[in-house]
Amino acid sequence: MTRPDEALQRALRYPYAAPERSFVLAEGRAVEPSAWSGPGMSDREPLLAYAANAAPAALTGKLGRRAEPLLAERAAAIGFDVVYSAHVSLYGAVPATLVPSPGTEVAVFVLRLSAAQRQAIDATEPNYELSLLPGLECRLDDGRVLDELPVYLSRHGPLELDGSAVALAAVPAQRRRLPALSEPEVLDRVRRVLAPERSLERFVLDAAADPALARRWTALLRRS
């Protein structure tokens, strides 16, 4: 059973730490591709990943420490930004989605997944739909450019505060046009709208403990 302090930190630390370069995830550890001596994975089906799905710790939690290795190629999504989604997750965070943002280049990864790994990640994304982004230009660190990559996009759309979508301050971007906030800052803004009588800690823990409450708050957030 997850302790309250662990549940709180899980939400507040979203989207978790992502490497600054490509990596292979094997047995819960991220290693540089040049140090990987196992089988190649570049021919696997790609998935555009951002926020938590680009973080080794989150991927290990979704796939398991004993899962087969995966390749994550560092890239930049041209003309897009990673912003907060208009929902409260079942672990009490306000997660992310991807939206067009002309001129912006945001840090993402291209995961090379097996069919089993794709199914495992899909099972963790009840608030997302697997889609193809129109007009995508995804530039890998080695100069290759990919388009029409599948990506999980929020079913709830972007969160808007003061009339604007809000970028994740923790996700690096060049020429960012949108305001950016940290996860604790966004959670506190959302808390003030949905449950001002609760402290930030109580808001997160109540959402994590009660899935029905998290869904009700999501419905209210979308209407507000």
Image (cartoon, grey):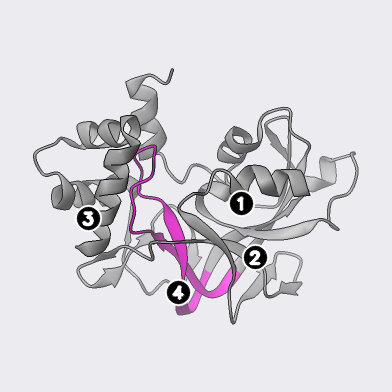
Helix or strand or loop: what does disc 2 sit on?
strand
Q: Which mark is residue 20?
A: 1
User: Is residue 170 or residue 164 the one in the foreground?
Assistant: 164
Is there CB contact under 8 Å for labels 3 and 1? no
Q: Could you classify mark 2 by the number of other residues whose Cα lies within 10 Å: few (under 14), some (14-19), or many (20 or more)?
A: some
Is there CB contact under 8 Å for labels 2 and 3? no
The residue where tag 2 is placed is 150
Q: Residue at the spot x=26%, y=32% of the render? A: 206
Depth-wise, is mark 4 or mark 2 nearer the camera?
2
Q: Residue at the spot x=46%, y=46% of the render? A: 15
N-terminal of the two: label 1 or label 2?
1
Q: Could you classify mark 1 by the number of other residues whose Cα lies within 10 Å: few (under 14), some (14-19), or many (20 or more)?
A: few
N-terminal of the two: label 4 or label 1?
1
Is there CB contact under 8 Å for labels 3 and 4? no
- Give the CA distance from mark 4 to mark 2: 24 Å
N-terminal of the two: label 3 or label 4?
4
- Give the CA distance from mark 2 to mark 3: 29 Å
Task: From the top left corner, tell me how far across and down residue 187 is, in percent.
Answer: 27, 47
Residue range corresponding to the magenta coloring: 77-105
Q: Mark 3: which amino acid? A: Leu
The residue where tag 3 is placed is 220
N-terminal of the two: label 3 or label 1?
1
Q: Could you classify mark 4 by the number of other residues whose Cα lies within 10 Å: few (under 14), some (14-19), or many (20 or more)?
A: few
The residue where tag 4 is placed is 175
